[in-house]
Amino acid sequence: MNDSVREEYEQLVEDVRKYRFAYYNEDQPLVSDAEFDRLFHRLEEIERMHPQLVSQDSPTQEVGAVVVGGDLPTIEHAERMLSLDNVFSAEELRQWCAKTEASAGRPVRWLSELKIDGLAISLRYERGRLVSAATRGDGRMGEDIGVNARRLAGVPERLAGSGHPARVEIRGEVFIPVAAFEELNRFQEELRPRAVEEARKRWESRPAKTRGDFPEELERQRAMRRFPTFANPRNAASGGLRQQLEKKDGLEREAGEKRLASLDLYVHGVGAWPNPPVAAQSEVYDLLSEWGLPTSPYSRVFDAVDGVVGFVEAYGRDRHSVVHELDGIVVKVDELDLHEELGSTSRAPRWAIAYKYPPEEVHTKLLRIEVGVGRTGRATPYALMEPVLVAGSVVRQATLHNQDVVRSKGVLIGDTVVLRKAGDVIPEVLGAVVELRDGTETEFEMPRDCPECGTELRPMKEGDIDLRCPNAKDCPAQVRGRVEHIGSRGALDIEALGEVTAAALTQPVLPSQPPLQTEARLFDLTLEELVPIEVVVRDAETGEPKLDDEGRPVVRKPFQRTESVYPPEAAGMTPAERRKAKIRKIPEIKPSAQAVKLLEELDKAKTKELWRQLVALNIRHVGPVAARALADWFGSLEAIRAATPEEIAEVEGVGQTIADAVTEWFVVDWHEQIVESWTAAGVRFATPGHPGPGAAAARGGVLAGLSVVATGSLEGYSRDEAKEAIIHAGGKAASSVSKKTDFVAAGPGAGSKLTKAEELGIPILDAAGFRILVTEGPGALPGGTGLDAAGDQTSQNDDQITNDDGAPADAAGDAS
Ligand SMILES: NC(=O)c1ccc[n+]([C@@H]2O[C@H](COP(=O)([O-])OP(=O)(O)OC[C@H]3O[C@@H](n4cnc5c(N)ncnc54)[C@H](O)[C@@H]3O)[C@@H](O)[C@H]2O)c1
Ligand SMILES: [Zn+2]
């Protein structure tokens, strides 16, 4: 063996010891579990290759924590508590099962259980009475957590039933269920303002002359440290069980009580019980359950390994359907006589194995915090991290929402942070690994000015946490957002106008003056303007510029292509003449197909429906549904502009919020300019043939005064089309069923709205009935109008349909 291996080995031993201590004794992991497992595996590998290295005190021979020197007294286990060996793939699992069956010399039944991500405890019962409770510790000695364990719901003071052994150690896992964990963190949050208030009281009780100003910010930060957001349930459970409540008082005591109350337990084994009256581990569980101990409802026994692998795969897909966090599956030989026969190593039994799922929580480095500005001007800080694989995808960016969230997470730039994929998709920074700081980390400061246009950020309303860039008119980020929105499917649906094109038009590298400083000139764009544009290619996910091999941003020219053509002097020459004159083709810059398409599509968009034009104006709250209602009622932008807020609010499907937003929109100069220049460019802000405001109702539309709910999928109508048909017929397209609803049209997939309608006795129509209703009116329905059941003809404006974002989530794709 060479020196470098020895060196690596010694480093590994040292690291594993250090990480274990931090993890078990301080509930403060320094590396992620995946990283720890990797190091541990490497250690095992080196020892397999160089057995002479293995000494008794190698970490591979030990169960885990060091228990001496802590705050709690220690207790010796009657039988050692062991850890488990790991496998990381179905392949390794099958190999392990095959090997185990070979050692057993006969087929084995496999008990498969969820591996609970909690901490192991041992409950010692003598003749059915609880005498002590301890953590696993180093396997021989554990910490005495009897006082707290006695308060867990799953720990009976006396076992139920009879025939209890003289002595038995019941092993289990203490954990915090996912739901309780979320509640616990909410509780911690609620304690913080209370802590600040207490501090304020103490401050007020001091003589006014000496006390100075109340240090509110300082107290807020102190409260954050006293009642932090827990990063994961396992560590919160471990600390919760090992806390000494009697030493706490006040809010700390309350927090401790809450934490203890959030703990739960499943038992999964026994120790120091020489002759249990059963033959299988699964039967042990039945017995424990009869004794009143909580066993896991998720365990299954399989005759063949395929069943086990299926179990592993099923929970791999469905991890979040379980009440607790799990980090793997534990597979145990069910037959107890084989446990004896197979025995254990000094660290783990040979009759059980833990299959570990890939991690969903990882550590990575927080490189920078940047601030993005969106369509409505909101400034959102987001974390840029060293790329890391979590739950199957590479993550490098996560939103931090606002400056308060950054502060409450306590992360500094340069920190090692804990990253999790929440709800399986959205990456979330949970917090920092404070112990790994080296002093070079810096605090994030929310920039004073908009990073895109330099205007000072401010809250729009008093008390708003979010800061916004007030420069709505020509902040490039906001213009880019609005232009992209104009192209989206819920607005003018312009395929060539996606995010890259929007960026090219509003924030190009070249020319230095972007073609669009606001959206006013959108319909005046010319090929000549488009062709020279150069834009930086940005990562769709992070918004960061993509870099080439030499670290320079990748720049594209989406609107130009190069074509080789003969120069003008070659005009009219034959190929032979050109050859003779040595005239070659020269490259010439031409508009790309993308440029041509964009202008064509823009041209077509000018005469699209009025409601689409309204959505394209980016008026707050005016999304497709509200825009349709406005367009149907007023028939033109001119009529909408001429209306008072009261008149607008009276339109079915529109309420005061939208009405105010619309009226306020017209007051702004540069908004008027948009309307003017779009009109001049040929945008049609009117529905041809519309007879004027209130037409449908004035015409006495067939549904005038009636409220209709459409639910489920109605053949021949999309959701929006169904609403549109109702509004068009002069009716009110309501989104929830109430006593005021006159008809419910229900197709396949209709859920609670249909049930509600049945309960209320509201007439229910299928797609065919709905078609008759919206075209010919209720009188034409087969079997009469059904209006007897629906008394109220003057349904009110009670459910206005607003959409804060003003658009559906799907934006048009970018063809470039
Ligand atoms: N991040 C770090 O720095 C760090 C340090 C040390 C250990 N760790 C992590 O701790 C774990 C290793 O510790 P370990 O020795 O406790 O091993 P382990 O967690 O891999 O497996 C053994 C434990 O699983 C528990 N368990 C859960 N459900 C069970 C069930 N149904 N049946 C039987 N046992 C069940 C038992 O308490 C048992 O002691 C690894 O996940 C490792 O990544 C992390
Ligand atoms: Zn700005």
Image (spheres, helix red, strand yellow):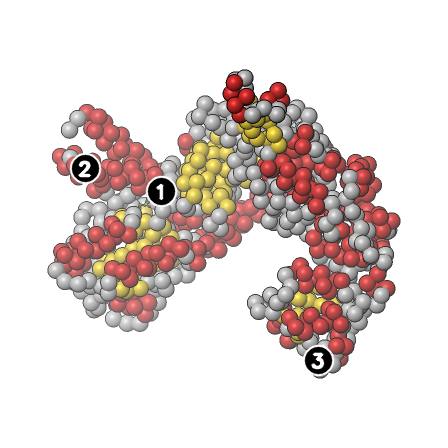
Residue 512 sits in which quadrant? top right
Measured as percent of width and height from the top left, residue 395 is found at 46, 40
- Marks 1 and 2 in Cβ contact (< 8 Å): no
Whether residue 580 sits left or right of residue 72 in the image: it is: right
Q: CA distance from mark 1 to mark 2?
A: 21 Å
Q: Nearer the viewer, residue 68 or 437?
A: 437
Measured as percent of width and height from the top left, residue 368 is found at 51, 30
**Residue displayed at 19% across by 62% down:** 108
**Residue displayed at 25% across by 71% down:** 163
Secondary structure found at label 3: loop
Whether residue 123 sits left or right of residue 106 in the image: it is: right
Asked if the beta carbon under badge 1 is closer than 8 A to the nearest atom of ligand 1, the reply is yes
Q: Which residue is mark 1?
A: 33
Q: CA distance from mark 2 to mark 3?
A: 84 Å
Residue 487 sits in which quadrant? top right
Sequence-earlier tag: 1 or 3: 1
Residue 47, numbered label: 2
Residue 782, numbered label: 3
Image quarter hosting the N terminus:
top left
Sequence-earlier tag: 1 or 2: 1
The amino acid at mark 3 is Pro
| Residues packed near mark 2 inside 10 Å, few (<14), some (14 to 19) or many (20 plus) | some
| Residues packed near mark 3 inside 10 Å, few (<14), some (14 to 19) or many (20 plus) | few
